[in-house]
Image: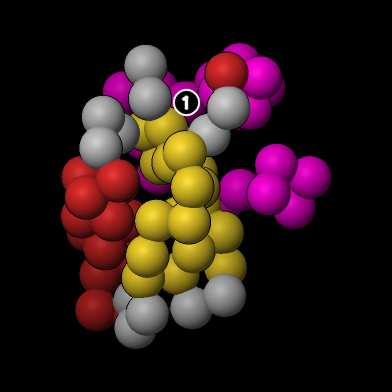
Amino acid sequence: MNGYLVLVDGARYAVQAETAQLSEQRARAFLGTGAQRIGASRKLTEAELAALQLSPGEVRPSPAEHG
């Protein structure tokens, strides 16, 4: 499973996705029209994925300690 830390308007979101592009699309769909600036900042490490335990397709705010 892959995941990305996506930065949206200064807030961090953990997104389960296979690619950076898909992670950005999922974050935009999750946040709707409120998302102004969006970009995948980096791929999550295996340790971060294990700690976050993201479900397939999940998007959620990321705690600061994971960024």
Give the secondary structure at mark 1: loop
Q: Residue furthest right?
A: 65
Amino acid type at circle 1 is: Leu
Write the residue at 57% across / 18% down: 46
Tell me, yes or no, if residue 26 can be seen here. Answer: no
Residue drawn at 45 percent across, 69 percent down = 8
Residue segment shown in magenta = 47-67
Badge 1: residue crowd in 10 Å (few <14, some 14–19, many ≥20): some
Residue 28 at x, y = what percent? 26, 63
Q: Quadrant of residue 25?
A: bottom left
- How far across and how far down the image is residue 27, in percent? 32, 56
Reply above or below: 8 against 1: below
Q: Using the image, determine if residue 29 lies above or below residue 43.
A: below
Residue 49 appears in view: yes
Lateral position of residue 18 relative to residue 7, left or right: left
Q: Which residue was labeled with disc 1?
A: 54
Q: Specify whether residue 23 is painted magenta.
A: no
- Does the magenta segment cover residue 59? yes
Residue at 30% from the left image edge and 34% from the top image edge? 17
